[in-house]
Amino acid sequence: MAPMTNKEKSIGFRRKLKEDVHKHMRFKEKDAKRKKRQQKEAEKIDWAFLKELIQWLRNAYSALKSVSIFSDGCAAQFKNKFTLSNLCHFQEDFDISGYWNFFATSHGKGAVDGVGGKLKRVAWEMVKSRKLLINDSEEFFNALNGKTNINLIYVSSQKIQDNKNMLTTRWESILPIAGLQSCHFFRPVSEKMLEIGQTHQNNIRNIPITKH
């Protein structure tokens, strides 16, 4: 068998390089789709918890008419078209109005971080002293409920699943939000329209949130 010429080696190398590039691109595309699916699932879980919190507030404060939400701007959790489109359904879901404010980058830390830290510390002390063993979220809730001055709300996996099914239908026709990351204020105008702005006073504009 005759040895390969330099030209044949070059053609073979280019062919192999092309195959490797295509394989890498297919992998990146699959990975991006997987991450997008995971993000949507996380957003559905976040909304399930927010729903329970707002319903708790409605029960605790019967005169409640509006909710102003402040959070950091993490796109994987709150600052995305899916979560923000739910603002347009506040009246339908809770019979109250609501709007969302996002802190500037690196300015979102606050009391809520200390609340979570206190609960984890109390739980760890109970486990360390062999008073109990915590295996899941329900056991965590049962162990700490009433042990501190922090009100706890338990959200079952069934409620999360029910919420997922509802949101899958609701999000079928959601439109992207142009300039999302530069905006820090979001307020519903109607079930299909969202008011957004750099702040609640600057660069305010209305955008459609659904295709239909």
Image (cartoon, rainbow, N blue to C red):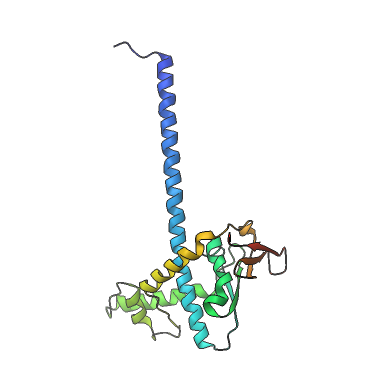
For residue 193, above or below residue 112: above
Q: How many marks?
A: 0
Residue at 56% from the left image edge and 80% from the top image edge: 95
Check the image and name the residue furthest to the front: 212
At 35% across and 73% down in the image, what residue appears? 137
User: Residue 61: in sight, yes or no?
Assistant: yes
Q: Is residue 76 visible?
A: no
Could you tell me which quadrant the N terminus lies in?
top left
Say above or below: 45 vs 65: above
Q: Residue 122 at x, y = what percent? A: 38, 78
Residue drawn at 40 percent across, 28 percent down: 16
* 11 or 96: nearer the viewer: 96
Quarter of image, res 9: top left
Is 127 placed left or right of 172 in the picture? left
**Quarter occupied by residue 25:** top left
Image-based side of 112 in relation to 204, left or right: left
Comparing 90 with 185, the one in front is 90
Q: Position of residue 101 (x, y in %)?
A: 61, 69
* Quarter of the picture holding the C terminus: bottom right
Q: Position of residue 165 (x, y in %)?
A: 42, 67
Hey, which residue is sitting farthest top in the picture?
Answer: 2
Q: Residue at x 44, y 73 (%)?
A: 117
In front of the other: 5 or 82: 82
Q: Decide: is 157 above or below 34.
A: below
On the image, the x and y values in percent for residue 100 come to 60, 70
